[in-house]
Amino acid sequence: MSYTIKFPSGGTLAIVPDDSIDTNRSVTFIGKDYKGYGFFQNQNFAILLANSASPNYSKPSNPITGQLWYDTTNKKLCIYEPTFDTNEGWASVGSATTGYDRPTGISVGDFWYDLSTNTLNLYAGSGNYLTLTSYPREFPNGWIKPPNPVLDNTLPQGVEQQVTLLQNYGNIVGALSNSSFTASSDDSNNTFSLADSAAYPIVRGLNIIGYLQATDGLILNSAPPSAGSPGVPGQIAFDSGFIYVCTSENVWKRSALTSF
């Protein structure tokens, strides 16, 4: 009497007649009364134990949904799902691939940490990677600089500073620096794209940045020139003598700063 092998989810995977074996899958199915069945049974255990790892780097033949395979080329554990559109239905399982070069055998949705640029990248298919917005530590004593340099306008001028930008839906809303300096707006590559040629202070820690009007550009904690200057409720600015708060649209109030 033939053995009917079922998928875990239902449906027939294989029918194995008496005294025969079926080698159409990654493991061997054994029919009733097959002589020497013990060899194939033990070999199946070895294949399962190693997750089909093979010295010739080949993928398992005729895989089924949910099957595991250890890719010895890329040293990644993979799972099979026929709807995956890359790597012949195999997708890696686990942490990001780390290295200086783009990895092979990677699937859509996999991560690659590029050691040459200290960036985390998401694989989008067809050889395309999306670099995720992040500023990891380049060295233990400082943050990696943004793509465009932030120039120190104090003497000596033109010194690049280490700054981490804070973004909200793609808009810069803050900046962190490990030292106080004055940001230059004279250079066309300036990250903040200020509307005029003035210089603005960046303080150690969190620097509040806000928009006024479209024609005013991006202002970094610049004190309003008058009580009726453009502003939005809740906006804060300061200078060496006062802290300024916008209490309603285009209405500013200030409070003197004192030493303690």
Image (cartoon, rainbow, N blue to C red):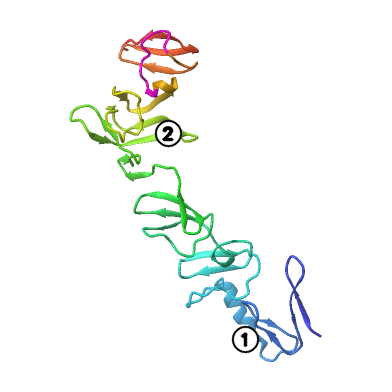
Position of residue 146 measured from the top left corner of the image (x, y, whole percent): 35, 39
Left or right of residue 131: residue 80: right
Where is 78 relative to 203, above or below? below
Left or right of residue 131: residue 26: right
Circle nearer the N terminus (2, 1): 1
Residue furthest to the bottom: 35
Q: Amino acid at mark 1?
A: Phe
Quadrant assignment for the C terminus: top left
Categorize mark 2 by other alpha carbons within 10 Å: few (<14), some (14-19), many (20+). Answer: some
Position of residue 79 measured from the top left corner of the image (x, y, whole percent): 58, 64
Residue furthest to the left: 156
Per the image, the residue denoted by label 2 is: 166
In front: 249, or 1? 249
Q: Is residue 42 magenta?
A: no
Measure the alpha-carbon separation of dots 2 and 1: 62 Å
- Residue 91: image quadrant is bottom right
Label number found at residue 57: none
Q: Main secondary structure of the magenta part?
A: loop
Categorize mark 1 by other alpha carbons within 10 Å: few (<14), some (14-19), many (20+). Answer: few
Position of residue 237 measured from the top left corner of the image (x, y, whole percent): 39, 17
The residue located at (53%, 54%) in the rendering is: 109
Per the image, the residue denoted by label 1 is: 39
